[in-house]
Amino acid sequence: MPTTALPTTALGARGLTLAYDDRVVVSSLDVDVPDGELTVVIGPNACGKSTLLKAFARTLKPSAGTVYLDGVPISSLRPKAAARRVAMLPQTPIAPDGITVRDLVSRGRFPHQDLLHPSSGSDRAAVQAALEQTDTVSLADRSVDELSGGQRQRVWIAMVLAQETDIVLLDEPTTFLDIAHQYDVLELAAELHRAGRTVVAVLHDLNQAARYATHLVAMRAGSIVAAGTPSEVLTASLVEDVFGLPCVVVPDPETGTPLVVPRRPAA
Protein backbone atom coordinates (compact mmCIF):
# COMPACT_ATOMS: atom_id res chain seq x y z
CA MET A 1 0.00 0.00 0.00
CA PRO A 2 1.54 3.39 -0.96
CA THR A 3 2.49 5.74 1.85
CA THR A 4 1.13 9.28 1.81
CA ALA A 5 4.01 11.73 1.39
CA LEU A 6 4.84 14.00 4.29
CA PRO A 7 3.85 17.68 4.05
CA THR A 8 6.11 19.74 1.83
CA THR A 9 5.57 22.82 4.00
CA ALA A 10 6.61 23.64 7.57
CA LEU A 11 3.12 22.95 8.95
CA GLY A 12 0.69 20.32 7.72
CA ALA A 13 -1.21 17.18 8.58
CA ARG A 14 -1.85 13.70 7.21
CA GLY A 15 -4.84 11.48 7.90
CA LEU A 16 -6.02 13.87 10.60
CA THR A 17 -9.14 12.91 12.56
CA LEU A 18 -10.30 15.26 15.31
CA ALA A 19 -13.13 14.67 17.76
CA TYR A 20 -14.70 15.88 20.96
CA ASP A 21 -15.50 12.73 22.93
CA ASP A 22 -17.37 10.57 20.39
CA ARG A 23 -18.32 13.43 18.06
CA VAL A 24 -15.99 13.43 15.06
CA VAL A 25 -15.49 16.92 13.62
CA VAL A 26 -12.65 16.38 11.14
CA SER A 27 -12.03 13.05 9.46
CA SER A 28 -8.97 11.74 7.58
CA LEU A 29 -7.83 15.21 6.52
CA ASP A 30 -4.64 15.91 4.56
CA VAL A 31 -3.55 19.55 4.50
CA ASP A 32 -0.41 21.60 3.85
CA VAL A 33 -0.21 25.20 5.09
CA PRO A 34 1.63 27.25 2.45
CA ASP A 35 4.81 28.79 3.84
CA GLY A 36 4.87 32.58 3.99
CA GLU A 37 1.22 33.00 2.97
CA LEU A 38 -1.77 34.54 4.72
CA THR A 39 -4.12 31.57 4.68
CA VAL A 40 -7.75 32.16 5.63
CA VAL A 41 -10.02 29.23 6.45
CA ILE A 42 -13.73 29.72 5.74
CA GLY A 43 -16.75 27.51 6.14
CA PRO A 44 -20.10 27.25 7.93
CA ASN A 45 -20.39 26.89 11.68
CA ALA A 46 -19.20 23.57 13.15
CA CYS A 47 -17.37 22.51 9.97
CA GLY A 48 -14.04 22.06 11.78
CA LYS A 49 -12.20 25.34 11.13
CA SER A 50 -11.31 26.21 14.72
CA THR A 51 -10.84 22.55 15.57
CA LEU A 52 -8.16 22.30 12.89
CA LEU A 53 -6.29 25.29 14.33
CA LYS A 54 -6.41 23.71 17.81
CA ALA A 55 -4.70 20.62 16.42
CA PHE A 56 -2.04 22.76 14.73
CA ALA A 57 -1.42 24.49 18.08
CA ARG A 58 -1.30 21.20 20.05
CA THR A 59 -4.27 22.17 22.21
CA LEU A 60 -6.34 19.29 20.80
CA LYS A 61 -4.91 15.79 20.48
CA PRO A 62 -5.86 14.03 17.23
CA SER A 63 -7.94 10.87 17.44
CA ALA A 64 -5.97 9.64 14.44
CA GLY A 65 -3.40 10.97 12.02
CA THR A 66 -0.52 13.37 12.59
CA VAL A 67 0.22 17.08 12.59
CA TYR A 68 3.72 17.72 11.26
CA LEU A 69 5.99 20.65 12.05
CA ASP A 70 9.20 20.91 10.05
CA GLY A 71 8.77 17.34 8.88
CA VAL A 72 8.39 15.69 12.30
CA PRO A 73 5.25 14.92 14.33
CA ILE A 74 4.51 18.00 16.42
CA SER A 75 3.54 15.70 19.30
CA SER A 76 7.16 14.49 19.48
CA LEU A 77 8.44 17.99 20.27
CA ARG A 78 8.72 19.45 23.74
CA PRO A 79 5.97 22.01 24.34
CA LYS A 80 8.40 24.93 24.52
CA ALA A 81 10.13 23.84 21.31
CA ALA A 82 6.82 23.79 19.46
CA ALA A 83 5.80 27.12 21.01
CA ARG A 84 8.95 28.73 19.65
CA ARG A 85 7.71 27.91 16.14
CA VAL A 86 3.90 28.19 16.37
CA ALA A 87 1.83 30.77 18.28
CA MET A 88 -1.95 30.83 18.51
CA LEU A 89 -4.55 33.39 19.49
CA PRO A 90 -7.68 31.42 20.52
CA GLN A 91 -11.24 32.66 20.08
CA THR A 92 -11.90 33.77 23.65
CA PRO A 93 -8.65 34.16 25.59
CA ILE A 94 -8.99 34.95 29.29
CA ALA A 95 -6.58 37.25 31.10
CA PRO A 96 -5.84 36.86 34.83
CA ASP A 97 -7.67 39.44 36.96
CA GLY A 98 -5.76 42.67 37.42
CA ILE A 99 -2.88 41.82 35.08
CA THR A 100 -1.32 44.75 33.24
CA VAL A 101 -0.90 44.90 29.50
CA ARG A 102 2.89 44.68 29.69
CA ASP A 103 2.75 41.67 31.99
CA LEU A 104 0.30 39.88 29.73
CA VAL A 105 2.38 40.54 26.62
CA SER A 106 5.46 39.35 28.54
CA ARG A 107 3.84 35.95 28.89
CA GLY A 108 4.50 35.44 25.21
CA ARG A 109 8.18 35.11 26.08
CA PHE A 110 7.65 31.99 28.22
CA PRO A 111 8.81 29.52 25.50
CA HIS A 112 12.17 31.33 25.34
CA GLN A 113 12.84 31.31 29.09
CA ASP A 114 14.04 28.78 31.64
CA LEU A 115 14.36 28.62 35.43
CA LEU A 116 17.88 30.01 35.41
CA HIS A 117 17.04 32.84 33.00
CA PRO A 118 13.41 33.88 33.58
CA SER A 119 13.83 37.17 31.73
CA SER A 120 16.48 38.88 29.65
CA GLY A 121 17.16 41.98 27.64
CA SER A 122 16.04 40.20 24.49
CA ASP A 123 12.73 39.35 26.18
CA ARG A 124 12.13 42.97 27.12
CA ALA A 125 13.05 44.09 23.61
CA ALA A 126 10.61 41.58 22.08
CA VAL A 127 7.81 42.77 24.35
CA GLN A 128 8.49 46.41 23.51
CA ALA A 129 8.56 45.64 19.79
CA ALA A 130 5.25 43.77 20.05
CA LEU A 131 3.66 46.71 21.89
CA GLU A 132 4.89 49.11 19.22
CA GLN A 133 3.74 46.91 16.34
CA THR A 134 0.21 46.69 17.76
CA ASP A 135 0.09 50.37 18.78
CA THR A 136 -0.44 49.47 22.44
CA VAL A 137 2.58 51.16 24.05
CA SER A 138 0.31 53.76 25.65
CA LEU A 139 -1.67 50.96 27.27
CA ALA A 140 1.32 49.11 28.73
CA ASP A 141 0.73 50.02 32.37
CA ARG A 142 -3.05 49.74 32.30
CA SER A 143 -5.01 46.75 33.54
CA VAL A 144 -6.31 44.53 30.76
CA ASP A 145 -9.68 44.58 32.55
CA GLU A 146 -10.05 48.30 31.75
CA LEU A 147 -9.64 47.99 27.99
CA SER A 148 -12.23 48.03 25.24
CA GLY A 149 -12.75 44.95 23.12
CA GLY A 150 -10.65 46.32 20.27
CA GLN A 151 -7.80 47.34 22.56
CA ARG A 152 -7.87 43.99 24.30
CA GLN A 153 -7.69 42.10 21.02
CA ARG A 154 -4.62 44.09 19.97
CA VAL A 155 -2.99 43.30 23.31
CA TRP A 156 -3.59 39.58 22.84
CA ILE A 157 -2.06 39.83 19.38
CA ALA A 158 0.91 41.64 20.94
CA MET A 159 1.39 38.66 23.25
CA VAL A 160 1.40 36.36 20.22
CA LEU A 161 3.93 38.60 18.46
CA ALA A 162 6.18 38.66 21.51
CA GLN A 163 6.41 34.89 21.16
CA GLU A 164 8.43 35.56 17.98
CA THR A 165 7.27 32.56 15.98
CA ASP A 166 7.42 32.08 12.24
CA ILE A 167 3.87 30.67 12.22
CA VAL A 168 0.90 32.57 13.69
CA LEU A 169 -2.58 31.09 14.08
CA LEU A 170 -5.53 33.45 14.61
CA ASP A 171 -8.87 31.84 15.48
CA GLU A 172 -11.69 34.26 14.61
CA PRO A 173 -9.63 37.32 15.60
CA THR A 174 -12.38 39.78 14.61
CA THR A 175 -15.19 38.28 16.71
CA PHE A 176 -17.08 40.81 18.87
CA LEU A 177 -15.20 43.77 17.33
CA ASP A 178 -16.85 46.69 15.58
CA ILE A 179 -16.21 47.09 11.88
CA ALA A 180 -13.32 49.56 12.21
CA HIS A 181 -11.47 47.37 14.73
CA GLN A 182 -12.08 44.31 12.57
CA TYR A 183 -10.15 45.92 9.73
CA ASP A 184 -7.44 47.11 12.13
CA VAL A 185 -6.83 43.50 13.17
CA LEU A 186 -6.87 42.25 9.59
CA GLU A 187 -4.41 44.93 8.51
CA LEU A 188 -2.13 43.78 11.33
CA ALA A 189 -2.39 40.18 10.08
CA ALA A 190 -1.47 41.43 6.60
CA GLU A 191 1.55 43.24 8.04
CA LEU A 192 2.72 40.00 9.66
CA HIS A 193 2.42 38.25 6.31
CA ARG A 194 4.32 41.00 4.50
CA ALA A 195 7.06 40.68 7.13
CA GLY A 196 7.52 37.05 6.08
CA ARG A 197 5.50 35.14 8.65
CA THR A 198 3.11 32.31 7.85
CA VAL A 199 -0.33 33.38 9.08
CA VAL A 200 -3.44 31.20 9.32
CA ALA A 201 -6.73 32.84 10.29
CA VAL A 202 -10.27 31.57 10.67
CA LEU A 203 -12.80 34.17 9.47
CA HIS A 204 -16.57 34.19 8.99
CA ASP A 205 -16.83 37.25 6.75
CA LEU A 206 -16.29 36.03 3.19
CA ASN A 207 -15.50 39.46 1.80
CA GLN A 208 -12.88 40.14 4.46
CA ALA A 209 -11.40 36.71 3.76
CA ALA A 210 -11.24 37.44 0.04
CA ARG A 211 -9.66 40.84 0.58
CA TYR A 212 -6.86 39.74 2.91
CA ALA A 213 -6.09 36.12 2.09
CA THR A 214 -3.32 35.16 -0.27
CA HIS A 215 -4.46 31.53 0.10
CA LEU A 216 -8.06 30.57 0.82
CA VAL A 217 -9.30 27.24 2.20
CA ALA A 218 -13.00 26.35 2.20
CA MET A 219 -14.21 23.64 4.58
CA ARG A 220 -17.49 21.79 4.89
CA ALA A 221 -18.39 18.98 7.30
CA GLY A 222 -14.79 18.41 8.37
CA SER A 223 -13.33 18.27 4.87
CA ILE A 224 -11.55 20.71 2.59
CA VAL A 225 -13.69 21.30 -0.50
CA ALA A 226 -11.52 23.95 -2.21
CA ALA A 227 -8.15 25.66 -1.78
CA GLY A 228 -6.31 28.27 -3.79
CA THR A 229 -6.36 31.99 -4.40
CA PRO A 230 -9.53 33.87 -3.41
CA SER A 231 -10.45 34.26 -7.10
CA GLU A 232 -10.11 30.53 -7.64
CA VAL A 233 -12.08 29.50 -4.56
CA LEU A 234 -14.73 32.13 -3.94
CA THR A 235 -17.23 31.51 -6.73
CA ALA A 236 -21.00 31.85 -6.63
CA SER A 237 -21.43 28.10 -7.02
CA LEU A 238 -19.08 27.35 -4.12
CA VAL A 239 -20.76 29.87 -1.82
CA GLU A 240 -24.18 28.39 -2.55
CA ASP A 241 -22.89 24.83 -2.24
CA VAL A 242 -20.96 25.36 1.02
CA PHE A 243 -23.05 28.03 2.75
CA GLY A 244 -26.44 27.56 1.10
CA LEU A 245 -26.41 31.22 0.05
CA PRO A 246 -27.50 32.17 -3.47
CA CYS A 247 -25.30 35.07 -4.55
CA VAL A 248 -23.40 36.80 -7.27
CA VAL A 249 -19.66 37.39 -7.05
CA VAL A 250 -18.31 40.63 -8.48
CA PRO A 251 -14.93 42.41 -8.25
CA ASP A 252 -14.45 44.50 -5.12
CA PRO A 253 -14.26 48.09 -6.40
CA GLU A 254 -11.43 48.85 -3.95
CA THR A 255 -9.19 45.79 -4.32
CA GLY A 256 -10.46 43.77 -7.28
CA THR A 257 -10.82 40.71 -5.04
CA PRO A 258 -14.06 38.69 -5.10
CA LEU A 259 -17.02 40.41 -3.47
CA VAL A 260 -19.96 38.23 -2.46
CA VAL A 261 -23.36 39.89 -2.95
CA PRO A 262 -26.30 37.83 -1.64
CA ARG A 263 -29.31 37.51 -3.93
CA ARG A 264 -32.63 38.75 -2.66
CA PRO A 265 -35.19 35.98 -2.17
CA ALA A 266 -37.97 35.81 -4.71
CA ALA A 267 -41.08 37.75 -3.76
Image: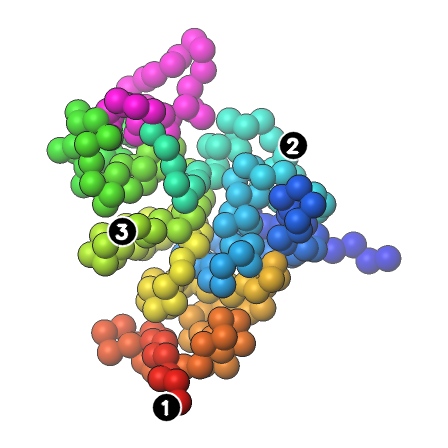
The disc placed on residue 132 is none
Q: Which-is-in-front pick, marks 3 and 2?
A: 3
Mark 1: give few (<14), some (14-19) or many (20+) Cα within 10 Å: few
> Can residue 72 be seen here?
no
Of 193 and 43, the residue lying toward us: 43
Residue drawn 39% across the image and 51% down it: 172
Instruction: Name the N-terminal-most of marks 3 and 2.
Output: 2
Q: Which residues are magenta?
A: 96-125
Tell me the residue that label 3 is attached to.
177
Residue drawn 48% across the image and 32% down it: 83
Q: Name the residue at the front extreme.
A: 267
Task: Tell me the distance, in whole angstroms, between the alpha carbons under discs 1 and 2.
Answer: 58 Å
Q: Is residue 121 above or below residue 17?
A: above
Instruction: Name the N-terminal-most of marks 1 and 2.
Output: 2
> Can residue 104 be seen here?
yes
Q: Quadrant of residue 231?
A: bottom left
Q: Quadrant of residue 194?
A: bottom left
Tell me the residue that label 1 is attached to.
267
Tell me the residue that label 2 is attached to.
76
Mark 2: give few (<14), some (14-19) or many (20+) Cα within 10 Å: few
Dot 1 falls on a residue whose secondary structure is: loop
Q: How many marks?
A: 3
Residue drawn 54% across the image and 63% down it: 219
At label 3, the amino acid type is Leu
Q: Is residue 257 above or below residue 195?
A: below
Task: Tell me the distance, in whole angstroms, between the alpha carbons under discs 3 and 1.
Answer: 34 Å
